[in-house]
Amino acid sequence: MRSDTENAEQPLLRVINPDATPEEVAALVAVFSALGSAGGEPPRKPRPSWNLPARGVRTTHRHGEGAWRASGLPR
């Protein structure tokens, strides 16, 4: 088991290519730091359709041929 001091001494990122420019290394660090800080609040779950406020509002009945069948179908 490692202690915190041993983890702090090891680098998080090691560049193996000796021809890497400081700009390339900075770009890599920026990408990895952006990926690691993508926390924030989690996305909201979709509401189930039975719990929608619009279902509590009464609608007018359909009229015409097949209206009795359509009156039992959800909109």
Image (cartoon, rainbow, N blue to C red):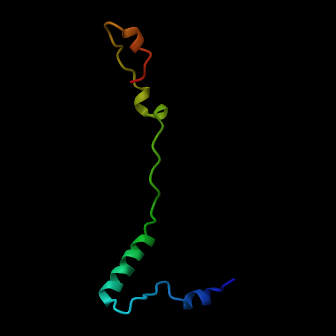
Number of residue marks: 0
> With respect to residue 37, does 26 lie above or below?
below
> With respect to residue 56, does 9 lie above or below?
below
Q: Quadrant of the C terminus?
A: top left
> With respect to residue 42, does 36 lie above or below?
below
> With respect to residue 4, does 41 lie above or below?
above
Q: Quadrant of residue 59?
A: top left
Q: Nearer the viewer, residue 2 or 39?
A: 2
Q: Is residue 59 left or right of residue 14?
A: left
Residue 31 horizontal/vertical position (percent): 37, 75
The residue drawn where x is 47% and y is 57% is: 42
Identify the residue at the far right of this view: 1
The residue drawn where x is 50% and y is 88% is: 11
The residue drawn where x is 40% and y is 9% is: 68
Q: Quadrant of the N terminus?
A: bottom right
Q: Quadrant of residue 34?
A: bottom left
Q: Is residue 12 left or right of residue 24?
A: right
Q: Quadrant of residue 29?
A: bottom left
Residue 48 horizontal/vertical position (percent): 48, 37
Identify the residue at the far top of this view: 65
Residue 24 horizontal/vertical position (percent): 32, 84
Q: Nearer the viewer, residue 15 or 71?
A: 15
The residue drawn where x is 48% and y is 34% is: 51
